[in-house]
């Protein structure tokens, strides 16, 4: 999945592994070995180790020191809990952006949304995902609260985007996201932090609904594949 910044080896490995786990290409309960993964993806062991640590944070694997890494089943409650954390943090950071962002920062955010709009017009999902990531990252990083941003980004975006990418998305989904981004921009222009917080929370909750639908579709496909002759 394309990101608006240079993709590091560990990000690439994390994305590939995540997609393979969600697609059922790596069996649940199966063991992953660092050296084998490094050879498979053409990288050293270190980025594989970092990728697995990220996927452990997303609840997709369990790391057992001196034993290896085991693939976990996707967990509906984990998705709900991670989005609840994401909602609380993103709503707070949107409130802060509305209070503190300079006119220059607002103009930069508008430019990022213009790129998102262009990608939405083309219905180019890799570009849409990259532009969406850039839009939210700019808001989340603006106040300098790196601890909050680093909780949101690895535990929330990757797994959500992978599930939605696997299921596929519609024009209605694209229209909703665009409308909510522009509503958030309006709140920022009006210097209305309470409205920005409310819109941000609504945005995350709507995404959670889509993610849970995608999760159910993934589970149904997996169940069907186990019963088909």
Image (cartoon, rainbow, N blue to C red):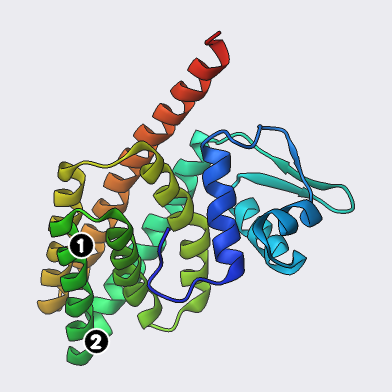
| Residue where numbered disc 1 is placed | 119
Q: Height in image: 221 above or below 74?
A: above
- Look at the image and tell me in which quarter the C terminus lies: top right
Q: Residue 103 location, x and y as percent?
A: 17, 90
The mark closer to the camera, 1 or 2, is 1
- Indicate the quadrant where residue 172 lies: top left
Q: Say few, some or many: other residues with alpha carbon within 10 Å of mark 2 (under 14 / 14 to 19 / 20 or more).
A: some
Q: Is residue 68 left or right of residue 196?
A: right
Q: Residue 68 location, x and y as percent?
A: 82, 48
- Look at the image and tell me in which quarter the N terminus lies: bottom left
**Label 2 residue SS:** helix
Residue at 45% over, 22% down: 220
Residue at 72% over, 53% down: 37
Q: Height in image: 221 above or below 63?
A: above
- Indicate the quadrant where residue 168 lies: top left
Q: Residue 210 location, x and y as percent?
A: 31, 40
What number is the disc on residue 205? none
């Amino acid at each position: 999945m394309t990101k608006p910044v240079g993709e590091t080896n560990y990000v690439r490995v994390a994305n590939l592994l995540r997609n393979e786990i969600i697609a059922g290409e790596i069996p649940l309960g199966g063991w992953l070995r660092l050296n084998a993964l490094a050879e498979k993806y053409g990288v050293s062991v270190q980025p594989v180790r970092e990728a697995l640590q990220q996927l452990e944070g997303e609840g997709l694997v369990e790391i057992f020191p001196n034993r290896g890494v085991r693939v976990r089943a996707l967990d509906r409650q984990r998705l709900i809990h991670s989005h609840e954390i994401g909602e609380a943090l993103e709503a707070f950071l949107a409130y802060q952006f509305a209070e503190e962002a300079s006119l220059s920062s607002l103009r930069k955010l508008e430019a990022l949304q213009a790129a998102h709009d262009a990608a939405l017009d083309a219905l180019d999902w890799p570009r849409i995902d990259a532009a969406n990531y850039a839009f939210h990252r700019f808001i989340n990083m603006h106040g300098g609260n790196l601890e909050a941003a680093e909780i949101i980004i690895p535990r929330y975006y990757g797994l959500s985007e992978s599930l939605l990418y696997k299921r596929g998305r519609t024009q209605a989904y694209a229209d909703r996201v665009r409308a909510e981004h522009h509503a958030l921009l309006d709140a920022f222009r009006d210097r209305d932090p309470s409205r920005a917080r409310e819109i941000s929370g609504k945005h995350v909750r709507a995404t959670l609904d889509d993610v849970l639908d995608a999760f159910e579709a993934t589970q149904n496909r997996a169940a069907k594949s186990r019963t088909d002759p």
